[in-house]
Image (cartoon, helix red, strand yellow):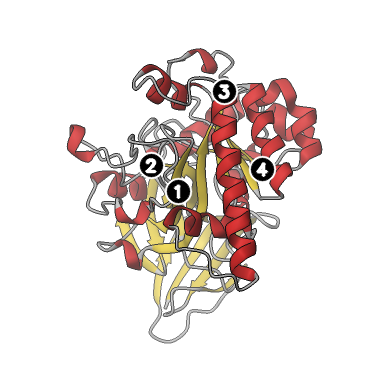
């Protein structure tokens, strides 16, 4: 067992504990959180010396392990650019846990991420929610599949319409291709449920968790009209949806709040590399939150290295987001919005013992990083 004492604790679900303790059990779960916890016999004790302690950070949208550091073309395993509909692709078959980005993320206080295919295809394949410690992806999975990637806007058009001179060349075609796949998947599901035993189709099999409401469509959409098109199609087929990137979200904040889908905002740090990013701004999380949208902040790593997720939250604070919401936007909000909130994202009894002791508060201190990172009750990084 492991006891952290003398800690300033942010649980993300209740008031801060100014001088508190956290007890982690041998099963890798949180056993107790409170002001005064006695150390059980044989327990290892860590004195936090007043440092900030939080749950490990969670990124709701990235490509860690599929777009590898320092590997060039050989490390690019995140876009199967051969046909626009590839739902049968599975992130877990490309993730490389030996990528140095994993260790860097852990040192930055990020312990879990939802990672998967890129946005070249209209439908790119399934994402996985994973812990960022391990040598074998099978042992790192929190949830798989966690979402089905789909993409709107410039990327599918550029990869096919410009590069291959084939559909989709327009936004109409992108929507049509997705809609056709959903129609076929719905019919395939209905036939299976009715005992008609349709001919096996791997693409349609991969879409069944979406059609059954088990996972959402994960919609890459920057421009306001693309965001609203993703909502239109999701409502048409009665499927779940997350709004990933949501760059123009501030322009339609009231509409998005009324619809109720979670928004994963980012990557915001860096240049505006294409037309649909012209409204990119760190003010977007604050505007969406004020309207009532559940906002998570994302890196889209490696676009922004994953260890800089807390920095992105701090820049959103500087642009008007309140500090508590910013912390939640990189912990409990993405955990809940991606369907893994019962395990990670907050410091609560029974949840996974993923804990970060910080060198300083990253929301107020440039250069703050993890002093100690704990995943499943084990110390995996020490500054």
Q: Image quarter for residue 28?
A: bottom left
Q: Name the residue under label 4.
A: 262
Task: Tell me the tag on residue 171.
Answer: 3
Alpha carbon of mark 3 to alpha carbon of mark 4: how far?
Answer: 23 Å
Badge nearest the viewer, 2 or 3: 3
Q: Which of marks 3 and 4 is nearer the N terminus?
A: 3
Nearer the N terminus, badge 3 or badge 1? 1
Query: Measured from the top left, where is residue 365 in percent x and y?
Result: 47, 33
Asked whether disc 3 touches disc 1, contact meaning CB atoms under 8 Å apart, the reply is: no
- What is the distance, in whole Å, between disc 2 and disc 1 at their CAs? 16 Å
Which residue lies at the image location 46% right of the left edge and 26% below the top edge?
A: 167
Measuring from the top left, give residue 64's x and y in whole percent.
35, 44
- Compared with residue 377, is residue 252 higher up or lower down, i.e. above or below? above
Residue labelled with disc 2: 63
In the picture, residue 187 is in which quadrant?
bottom right
CA separation, marks 2 and 4?
Answer: 19 Å
């Amino acid at each position: 067992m492991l006891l952290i004492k003398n800690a300033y604790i942010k649980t993300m679900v209740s008031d801060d504990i100014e001088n508190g303790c956290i007890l982690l059990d041998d099963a890798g779960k949180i056993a107790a959180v409170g002001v005064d916890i006695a150390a059980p016999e044989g327990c290892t004790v860590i004195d936090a010396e007043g440092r900030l302690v939080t749950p490990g950070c969670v990124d709701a949208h990235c490509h860690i392990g599929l777009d590898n550091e320092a590997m060039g073309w050989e490390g690019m395993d995140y876009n199967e650019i051969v046909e626009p509909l590839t739902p049968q692709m599975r992130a877990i078959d490309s993730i490389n846990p030996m990528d140095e980005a994993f260790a860097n993320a852990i040192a930055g206080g990020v312990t879990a991420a939802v990672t998967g295919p890129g946005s070249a295809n209209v439908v790119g394949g399934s994402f996985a929610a994973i812990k960022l410690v391990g040598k074998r992806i099978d042992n790192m999975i929190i949830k798989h599949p966690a979402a089905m990637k789909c993409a709107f806007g410039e990327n599918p058009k550029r990869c096919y319409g410009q590069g291959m001179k084939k559909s989709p060349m327009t936004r109409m075609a992108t929507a049509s291709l997705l809609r056709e796949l959903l129609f076929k998947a719905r019919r395939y599901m209905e036939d299976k449920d009715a005992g008609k035993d349709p001919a096996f189709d791997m693409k349609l099999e991969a879409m069944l968790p979406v059609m059954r409401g088990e996972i959402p469509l994960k919609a890459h959409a920057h421009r306001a009209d693309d965001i609203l098109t993703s909502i239109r199609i999701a409502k048409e087929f009665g499927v779940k949806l997350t709004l990933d990137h949501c760059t123009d979200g501030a322009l339609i904040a009231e509409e998005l709040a009324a619809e109720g889908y979670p928004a994963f905002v980012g990557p915001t740090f860096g240049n505006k590399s294409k037309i649909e990013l012209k409204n990119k701004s760190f003010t977007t999380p604050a505007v969406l939150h004020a309207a009532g949208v559940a906002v998570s902040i994302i890196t889209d790593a490696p676009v922004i290295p994953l260890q800089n997720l807390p920095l992105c939250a701090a820049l959103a604070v500087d642009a008007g987001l309140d500090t508590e919401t910013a912390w939640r936007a990189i912990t409990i909000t993405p955990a809940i919005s991606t369907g893994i909130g019962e395990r990670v994202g907050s410091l609560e009894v029974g949840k996974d013992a993923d804990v970060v002791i910080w060198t300083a508060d990253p929301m107020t201190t440039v250069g703050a990083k993890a002093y100690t990172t704990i995943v499943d009750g084990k110390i995996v990084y020490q500054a």
